[in-house]
Amino acid sequence: MSDERPLVGVAAVSLLFGVMLQIVPLPAMLADLRPDWLLLILVYWCLTTPSRFGLSLAFVLGLVLDTLTGALLGQHALAMLLVVLVALKFRLRVRVFPMAQMMIAILVLLTIYQFTLFWIDGVTGRTVDPAARWQPLVTGTAAWPLVFWLLNRARRDAGPQPIRLD
Amino acid sequence: MNRRTESVGPSRGLPLGVRFFLLAGLAAGLMVADQRQQHLDTVRNTLAVALYPVQAAVDLPFAAWHWSTTTLSSRRALLEEIDTLRRRNLDSHVRLQRLDALEAENARLRAMMESSARVADRVLVAEILAVDMDPYRHRFTINKGERHRVYVGQALLDADGIMGQIVRVQPFTAEAILISDADHALPVTVNRNGLRTIATGTGDTDRLSLPFLPNSADIREGDLLVSSGLGGAFPSGYPVGRISRVERRPGDGFASVDMEPLAALNRAREVLLVWSQTANGELPEPSPEADLQPQTDPLPDAPPNGDAQ
C-alpha cells in the first residue's frame, strides 16, 4: 500500500472548491443553470478511489449543502447517499465506459439526485417549480467531461500512484 | 483484492447496502426532526459556524470589489454623489420637520382614542453576503446573527421599502426570505383608503400578487401599499409596493391584482434590520451597534391597553 495522503489532499481541495462553486453568486438568469458541482466532484472520487471516498463522505457533504442552502437538514444528504450508492454499485462498469456513455450514466445519477430533492420538497410542502428543475441535469452532464479531465490531471499530478488492476 | 472489500470501501466490515440504510435512516431522522422545528438548532449552528469561513471566502472578492469601487471612484463621481445626497438630505429634512408635528398630533389623537401609540423602531445596517442559496427560493444570508440579537421573524427593509424577514438565526449569520418568495405572504393595507389584504410572493422579484381582493374592491393602478402590522411580524406603516396591474374578471369572485415591490429585492447589498414593537408591547433590546436612530426617541408611557387599530 502506498502513501495516499497527497491524493486525499487533492480530493479535499477539489471538494472545497466544489462547495464554493455551489454558493458563488450567479446572475439571476444563470442561477437556475448552475450544475451540481459538488456532486460531480464527489462522484468522480467515488468512481476512482472507492476505498477512500464513499457513503460517509456523501452524508457529510450533503449536510454541508443543507446548511449552506438553507434546505431541510438531511435533504441533500439523502440525495447524495442515493447517488453514491448507485455510483459505487456500477462503478466497475462506468469506469470503462467511453466518455459519451459515461455522460449518460452521469445524467442518470443527476436525475436521481434532482428527483430526490424535488420529491422531498414536495413531501414537506414547499413550493417547487418543476420546469426549472431540469436545467441542472443538462448543464451538469455537459460539465462532466471538464470535471473528469481536470480531476484526472490533478490526480495524476498528486504523485506516483500504485498501479491498480481493478 | 477481493470484490467485497473493494466495493465496500474502507472495509469497515459492514456491506455497502447496510451502511447505506444506516446513513439514509439517519438522514431521514434528521429531516423529520428538522421539519418538526427547532430540535436541531445546535447541529445547524455548529455546521453554520464551521462553514462561515467558506461563505466569507466566497463573499470576499465581491466585498473587495465593492470596497475598491467606492474607494477608488473618481473625485468627480464622489462630488456628484455628495451633491445628490445633500439635496436628498435637505428634502428629507423638510419632510421630517412636518413629521415631528404629525407624530405629536398622532400621539394626541391616539391617546384620545385610547389606543396604544406606535413606538419608534430601531434599525441596524446589515450586509447581504454574496453567496447563493437554493436557486428555487428567494433566500439570502446576511452578515449579522445571534450575536447582534437578530431574531426569527425580524423584518428587513432597504431604503425604499420592506424586503423580507429573518427565518433562521445562526451565531454570525442569519437567513432571510424575500417577500417575493413563493412561500411568503405579507399583510398590507392600501395607503389611500385603508383597505386591508394580503400580498403573496410569486417567485418573481418584480411582482407580488394580491389574490384575495374581490372585484368590487376599491383599488387601482398606482396605489401605494404599506405594511399593516397585523400578524405582528412586520412593523406597520412601511411601504411595500405599488399596484402595477388590476384585472377585474366578471366571471370570478376575485380580481387579479399584481403589485411591484418598492424595495430593490435583487439589487441591494445593504439592508436594515428593524427592531419593532412586538405584539405584547415589548421592544426587544437590539445589539449595542444599533445606535442608528435619528431623533426618534420612543414615545414615553404608551397606554398599555387597546389594539393598534
Image: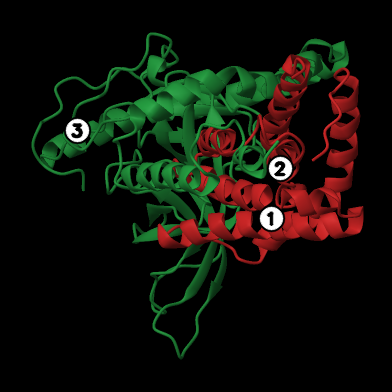
Chain colours: A red, B green
Most extreme residue toward the front, as rendered?
Answer: B2
Q: Is residue B132 above or below residue A134?
A: above
Q: Is residue B191 above or below residue B285?
A: below
Quadrant for the N terminus of chain B, please: top right
Q: Which chain carries label 1?
A: A
Q: In this view, does B121 lie above or below B179?
A: above
Q: Name the residue under label 3.
A: B108
Q: Report whether A15 appears left or right of B249.
A: right
Most extreme residue toward the bottom, as rendered?
Answer: B251
Q: In this view, does A40 lie above or below A156?
A: below
Instruction: Find out whether the residues at labels 3 and 2 contact each other: C-beta distance under 8 Å.
Output: no
Q: Measured from the top left, where is residue B145 in percent x and y?
A: 44, 21
Instruction: Find out whether the residues at labels 1 and 2 contact each other: C-beta distance under 8 Å.
Output: yes
Alpha carbon of mark 1 to alpha carbon of mark 2: how far?
9 Å
Q: What element carries label 3?
A: helix
Residue at 74% in and 37% down: A41
Q: Do labels 1 and 3 share a chain?
A: no
Mark 3 surroundings within 10 Å by alpha-carbon count, few (fewer than 14), some (14 through 19), many (20 or more): few
Alpha carbon of mark 3 to alpha carbon of mark 2: how far?
68 Å
A129 or B235: nearer the eye? A129
Q: Quadrant of residue B38?
A: top left
